[in-house]
Image (cartoon, rainbow, N blue to C red):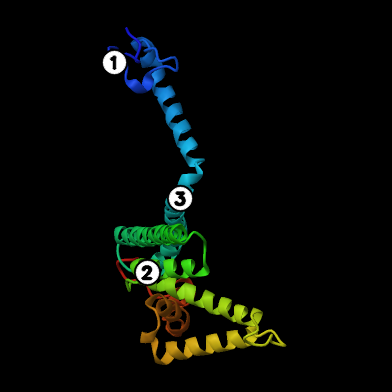
Amino acid sequence: MECCTTATFQCDTPFWLVCAACICVPSALVKVMAGPDLIKTLLYTVNNLLQQDKYRAALAVVKGFRNGAVYGAKIRAPHALVMTFLFRSGSLKDKLKAILKATYTHSRNLACFVFTYKGLQAVQEKIQGKTLQSHSFLAACVGGWLVFGDNNNINSQINMYLLSRILFALSRLAVEKGFIPQPKRDPFPLFATLVWGIVLWLFEYYPHTLQPSLQSSMNYLYHDSNVWHDISDFLIYNKPRTAAQK
């Protein structure tokens, strides 16, 4: 057995298991210590890497991808579960597939958007040497085009959810910046009045203009409640059960 600092390695111990004194560890000891020590070494290396400031921007992009995937799954899974079992017909297998597909799509899209957004922010900051408000806007525009520009049910729900939030936020910002005067009374009652008036008018006379999931919800609330045959589909069920269901 020779020291590993010689010109050639003549011991049968892998180089990553060489001790600090640069003396080869006996193979019997390696078999006992390789597993735990290798894991400890890997954890130490990874944790040390995570503390390096020069990699912080890239690591933030990676963690953003992780958080996007987790948050998307948390948000979509319970929503898809409820909506599928309330309004979707088909076998249990088909329903579970629909839930998994919706959850996967939401999780993937949000993860990809966060990755793109944070990555482009980091690139712009690196190029210009400072952070500007335009960086956030441009990075999000590109991410929105690439990820959420595909017109499907999941993206449609997410985009419309955000639209309602930014309209509120822009209204508050306009007041803060002095573009519109501070309301003397709380405008929320007027807002609620117009929202509900418009959405029910659209539902009753132009339902095709509304998102399918909103149509389903409103059909359940306002149209299905006009139909019943006996006590079973008046109080217990929404619609009469078929022979196959009984």
**Which mark is in front, 3 or 1?**
1
* Residue for badge 1: 7
Q: Residue 110, position in %: x, y?
A: 41, 61
Residue 93 falls in image quadrant: bottom left
Amino acid type of the residue that numbered disc 1 sits on in the rendered structure: Ala
Q: Residue 208, position in %: x, y?
A: 36, 86
* Residue for badge 3: 63
Q: Residue 215, position in %: x, y?
A: 41, 80
**Disc number at residue 121?**
none
Image point (34%, 67%), residue name: 146
- Tell which circle, 2 or 3, labels the residue nearer the N-terminal end: 3
Q: Secondary structure at mark 3?
A: helix
- Tell which circle, 2 or 1, labels the residue nearer the N-terminal end: 1
Q: CA distance from mark 3 to mark 1?
A: 42 Å
Q: Residues within 10 Å of mark 1 (few under 14, many from 20)?
A: few
Q: Quadrant of the N terminus?
A: top left
**Disc number at residue 148?**
2
- Tell which circle, 3 or 1, labels the residue nearer the N-terminal end: 1
Amino acid type of the residue that numbered disc 3 sits on in the rendered structure: Lys
Q: Residues within 10 Å of mark 2 (few under 14, many from 20)?
A: many
Q: Residues within 10 Å of mark 3 (few under 14, many from 20)?
A: some
Image point (47%, 83%), residue name: 222
Image point (63%, 87%), residue name: 180
